[in-house]
Image (cartoon, helix red, strand yellow):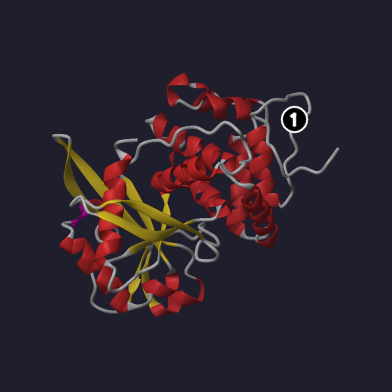
Amino acid sequence: MVWMDPLTANLLDLLFELREHPVPLTIGGGFGLYLKRMRLDETHDRTLFAQLPMPRATNDLDLFIRADVLCDLGSMEAVAAALGRLGYKVVPEAKYMQWKKHIDLHGQDREIKIDLLVGPLGHFRERLHVKGVRARPVGPIKLHAHTLEEAIHIDQSPVTLTVTGKRSNGQPSEAQIHLPQPFTYLMMKLFAFRDRKDDADKNLGRHHALDLYTIVAMQAESEYQESLRLGNLYSKDRHVETARRIIRSDFAEPTSIWRDPSSGASAFSTAVSRGRFHRCAQGDFSGVACRPNRKQSGAQEARFGWPAA
């Protein structure tokens, strides 16, 4: 996907600027799913569903900073300085949490946006300056992270990935980043879907719905087993309970938001209509492995994770 190349370049730009003061970053959102899909295309690992949708285009880099790193003023000053050197400006509507810059892509002006995020603060909250959804280190710094308390387990055992490509200046580069565990990814996307599904622009809800299907479908067997473990571990967490309610209310049956062919989610619509997505996603949050629909068969069925009949 050509549009993803500038995102890769700008991610590598930032990681290069941070080479003297490395800050571990976890990539979420649509671009993180794109990176996961590209790795699967290389490794050919068996995934929960055989049919995977193409990653959707995005202009965002959702960058998660670990809560303990956010407490360190020096690390955050390094990030702020790197963004400044790369020409990023604050987004007025989300000042110091979102940053943007304009690039030329084949003669067209395009915008790259960076969202700075942080997962559950836990005991680090007392070491941070927190106001509403904003969190920043104590000290004079104009760099904030948007807190996502539903991003459970994001700072523990992330998936490490090597990103290779060219920086904006054409120089080849390579760096390591992290991706959230599928369980955490599902948590974030379910809440994002809930918050946008009733927008006037229904495509906003559809985008998150398609991302949810992609996350479930792309789980390798070890990842799915880890999702089951985390579903058991956090089963009493109020955010997980909310996630289960969202799945039951919005994904148990096909509805108009899935059926629109313009959404490009035919595989997702099929999975919802046959109940596969509901069973497997619900399993992620209950610790119970999904079972295939015995009346259906074929490559699109869930391919592992259920007990033998």
- Seen in the image, is 200 located left or right of residue 273? left
Task: Identify the residue shown where x is 28% and y is 67%.
Answer: 18
For the magenta stretch, what is the residue range? 88-92
Question: Foreground residue, 46 or 76?
Answer: 46
Does residue 149 sit above or below 250 in this rendering? Answer: below
Quadrant including the C terminus: top right
Q: Position of residue 290 (x, y in %)?
A: 72, 41
Question: Foreground residue, 45 or 97?
Answer: 45
- Seen in the image, is 14 located left or right of residue 33? left
Q: Residue 208 in magenta? A: no
Task: Identify the residue shown where x is 53% and y is 33%.
Answer: 52
Extreme residue in the left direction: 107
Q: Is residue 191 visible?
A: yes
Extreme residue in the right direction: 309
Question: Foreground residue, 282 or 174?
Answer: 174
Q: Is residue 94 visible?
A: no
Q: Position of residue 238 (x, y in %)?
A: 61, 58
Q: Residue 89 in magenta? A: yes
Task: Identify the residue shown where x is 52% and y is 27%.
Answer: 258
Q: Position of residue 9 (x, y in %)?
A: 27, 50
Name the kind of residue labelled 1 in the image: Asn
- Seen in the image, is 175 located left or right of residue 271? left
Label 1, secondary structure: give it. Answer: loop
Q: Position of residue 300 (x, y in %)?
A: 64, 29
How packed is label 1: few (under 14 Cα within 10 Å), some, or many (20 or more)? few
Quarter of the figure with residue 171: bottom left
Quadrant including the N terminus: top left
Q: Can you identify the residue that label 1 sits on?
A: 293
Does residue 56 sit above or below 188 in this rendering? Answer: above
